[in-house]
Image: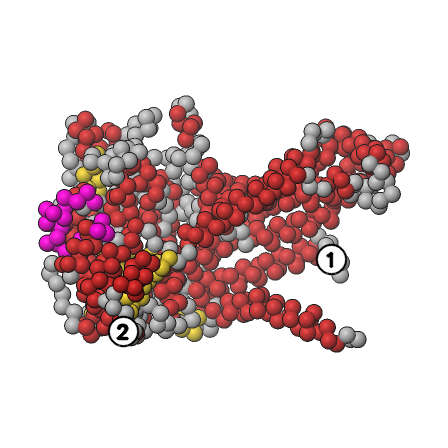
Amino acid sequence: MPSLISKLPCFLVRWKMSNISNDDSKSDNPIPFSRTRMTRRQAITAVAGGAIALAAVGAGLYYSAPTTTPSETTTMASSTLPSVSSAAGKISILGFNGALGDALVPVINAFQANTGITVEYTRIGYDELAEKGASLMTTQDTSFDIICQDDPFTPKFYEAGWYEPWETFGWQRDSDIFDGLIDLGTWPTPEYMGPVPPGARDKSPKQYAVGWGGGPCVNYVYRTDKLQELNLGEPKTWDDVEEIAKAANDQAKPFYGWVNRGAKGDPIAFDTFPIFFDYGLPSIFDDNWHVIVDGPEGVSALEKYLAIAKYGPPGLANYGATEQGLELVQGRVMQGLPVPGDVVKDVEGSQSLSAGKLKWMLPPAGPGAHTTIIGLFCMGISTYSLNKQTAWKFIDYFLSKEGQQVYTTQGQTWPLRRSLFSDPAINSQPWVKPLYPGSVEMFDAHPKPYPRTTLWLSLVNIYGGYLNLALTGGISPQDALSKAKVELEQELKRAGYIP
Amino acid sequence: MKDKHLIVPFVLLPTLFLIVISVYPLVYSVVLSFFRGLLERFIGFRNYSDILADSRFYAALWVTLEFTAITVGSEILIGLLLACSLALFSIKKPSWWQTVYIVPLAIPPVVSGVIWKILYHPSFGPLSLLGLIGLPVPDPLGQPNLAIFSVSLINIWMWTPFAFLVFYSGIRAIRPETVEAALIDGASKFQIFRTIILPSVRTLILVVIFWRFTANLTAFDEIMGSTEGGPGFVTTTLTIFAYWIGFKSWDMGYAASASVYLLLLVAVVGSTLFRRLGIVKE
């Protein structure tokens, strides 16, 4: 620093000389304008910088911009099919962007072709979907007839009466559709799925929606080839998983013993729920919404998870579905807990080094249970829809065997119907094959969803925040769960769930 | 007023514009804060009292102050250092360096957050190369004791150019005759720096402190783009806290009350700085 200071006056003297030579001495400002004027190179750099920034912003806007599709479908419907003039012959669906949302397009095409009813399918980003849905409903907007929402947000729709009960349309439970998918759309929630919010306990259960997109459950996957090399058997318990992680882990290669989504909030909370269930927790709450996750079962579950996760890649605490998928695609992990809907196409795709080498199955058992967590997008009819019957026609078609065949084969995803999952013509499809019979076993294990409460989005931020902190080593498992309990109960008290 | 016909275009319209874009959202936000959720149930001042009993609020307040202190202090020091170095050294093509220094200003903050998230990523970013040569790979955003500094660095990288530009223009505005006179009077170089340079840019330093302090109290994009407030809650500032409550938990009323407290904090800190730092004289 002193050397800088010592040069300062000299610089200023030179500056003065420069001013004189530039004949700017008459100016009050000692700095000649020519020196501050932007050169051509600067201008080009600035323009290029601005262009990059604009492109980046534009890209962000593009990805978040709503997309109304299938545009071809809508056009086709209005040009080649009998024109529909009444409002009852047209419905609008609010859905979500990405491959999961794309899967519905062939069903819409087929429905339009079969019925002549025009379907407008508007898709928006995941984060905007909850906000859009809530704002549409609070303003009693009639723009959309069918609204899709991720399941943690659906209790809000059920409790506020934003979805129309399906009993109105003559809905009958279909045993061929997996129970978990139907139960996710039932309110109040069935008992096995966890505690019922105080305000909903006395209501008689009704069907409001069905789970269909993404998910369906947290799977356990392992590399069959590597397990053979290690001369180890298929894991039956979480202790086995830890043993395999330790044996397979080689950070120098790198080849990691474990991967899951470790990012704060929903990702880590969702992915670790199976371990908590398996260690004997029916939920993180008891039937009266008191937090029980800090008990011995919860602490043991978290300790086991952390013992396994230490064989994960560096930065696991920031891993979302993208990073997890990348690790699997690059063939750098032995085992993990992916949600197929997020990654299966890529992980089992032709570019993946893990393709064909993974077994997708129900996560191993713990001392208390052997199950997993279910979570996916749901579809229901807006209570403010002006075309409820037509909307129901679409849902009825979607759930039908014919609709599900189209959905699975052309939409390239898994079927909601047991009979189709078991059909060799379906389960031999490359996008279903890895999930069969694992997914059916998972549905049969009565997977539980996130706790069914309108508060969950708030609670998961607290709970998932402390799990994430524990994963980074910033707090002990016991402290993480104890602190989470204090803050969770604070929220529950505020909402009147507990005294 | 002589030209009464000018009242509408030059007074009323701008006032109306200000009300629409500034006052209305503020009033709406205050109204929201009296409700549970998104205008679902009127609960009076309950959100305000609840938030004062919420340990997360105080944790977020502490992180906000920590983040602001680290970033503002660093931006002032580094900005001054850069401005002085460019002015002092006989660096070739100073205008080129000037352009290089201000490039971060052209990048949107949220993009900066994502860029740095990748740069910091221990598995997929450049840091992973350390592992290939057998060195331990740090996880700047994943380690609780490092995360706040790593996030602060993003803000410092983004906004130091602003401080640099202001200080550089201030130094260049000093009349060389003043310095020459001091040299003739036998002043030491340090005395010249302390008595001429620093007083000349003092007001600018105060302005930058004020501007960056109030801006960094509400910093959001770069934190959201990189850590989303994690790991755990160690980088959860008040704005991130309000965002999570409002847009992840959907309790808009509670988030609005947190925002009102934040607004009060910015107003108090801002006006205190204004007075204490002598930007305005009472």
Mark 2, secondary structure of its residue: helix
The image shows residue B109 at horizontal and vertical percentages of 52, 47
Question: For residue B100, what is the image quadrant?
Answer: top right
Report the quarter where the C terminus of chain A lies. Answer: bottom left
Question: Residue drawn 56% across and 42% down?
Answer: A49
The image shows residue B18 at horizontal and vertical percentages of 61, 67
Question: What span is in magenta?
Answer: A410-431
The numbered dot on residue A88 is 2
What residue is pinned by disc 1?
B280
Q: Nearer the viewer, residue A52 or A9?
A: A52
Main secondary structure of the magenta stretch: loop
* Letter of the chain that mark 2 sits on in the rendering: A
State left or right for residue B77 relative to residue B226: right
Question: Residue drawn 81% across and 44% down?
Answer: A29
The image shows residue A48 at horizontal and vertical percentages of 57, 42
Q: Nearer the viewer, residue A332 or A23?
A: A23
Q: Amino acid at mark 1?
A: Val
A49 versus A152 height, above or below: above
Question: Residue drawn 29% across and 75% down?
Answer: A86
The image shows residue A110 at horizontal and vertical percentages of 21, 59
Q: Amino acid at mark 2?
A: Ala
The numbered dot on residue A224 is none
The single residue placed furthest to the top in the displayed view is B133
Q: Nearer the viewer, residue B136 or A107?
A: A107
A347 versus A194 height, above or below: above
